Image: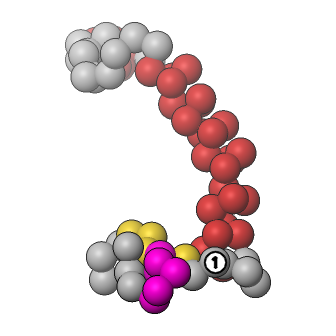
Amino acid sequence: MVDLYNVETYNADTGFKAGYLNELERMIRTLKRDWTILYDMLSGKDNSNFGWDEHRQMVVAEDADGTHI
């Protein structure tokens, strides 16, 4: 700690706003809560035509007539 203070980087502006840790913790709680929904949607036995497009790195779905939406 003394070394950090001596090189004047201890109180450096990191670019984060005050209270960012609370926001980060809230997002992590939301992700943990909703993870099972996403997991079941993509890899459950009844995935309702949802999937993961590896090339575009996004969730894809098929409409009732078989076209991608």
Q: Where residue 53 appears, x then y in whole percent?
A: 40, 81
Q: Where residue 12 appears, x then y in whole percent?
A: 26, 15
Say which quarter of the image contains residue 7.
Answer: top left
Answer left or right for 25 relative to 18.
right
Q: Is residue 65 magenta?
A: yes
Quadrant in which the C terminus appears: bottom left
Give me the residue at 31% from left, 11% from top.
11
Asked whether the viewer can see residue 53, the reply is no
Q: How many marks?
A: 1
State the residue lying farthest toward the bottom: 66
Q: Main secondary structure of the magenta part?
A: loop
Q: Is residue 44 magenta?
A: no
Q: Nearer the viewer, residue 5 or 23?
A: 23
Asked whether the viewer can see residue 56, the reply is yes
Q: Where residue 49 appears, x then y in whole percent?
A: 57, 81
Say which quarter of the image contains residue 27.
Answer: top right
Q: Nearer the viewer, residue 60 or 12?
A: 60
Give me the residue at 34% from left, 15% from top.
17
Answer left or right for 66 relative to 42.
left
Give me the residue at 43% from left, 75% from top.
60
Amino acid type, residue under disc 1 in the picture? Ser
Give me the residue at 76% from left, 84% from top.
45
Q: Where residue 9 appears, x then y in whole percent?
A: 26, 18
Residue highlighted by disc 1: 48
State the residue lying farthest toward the right: 45
Characterize the local packing of mark 1: few (<14), some (14-19) or many (20 or more) Cα atoms within 10 angstroms.
Answer: some
Q: Which residues are magenta?
A: 61-66
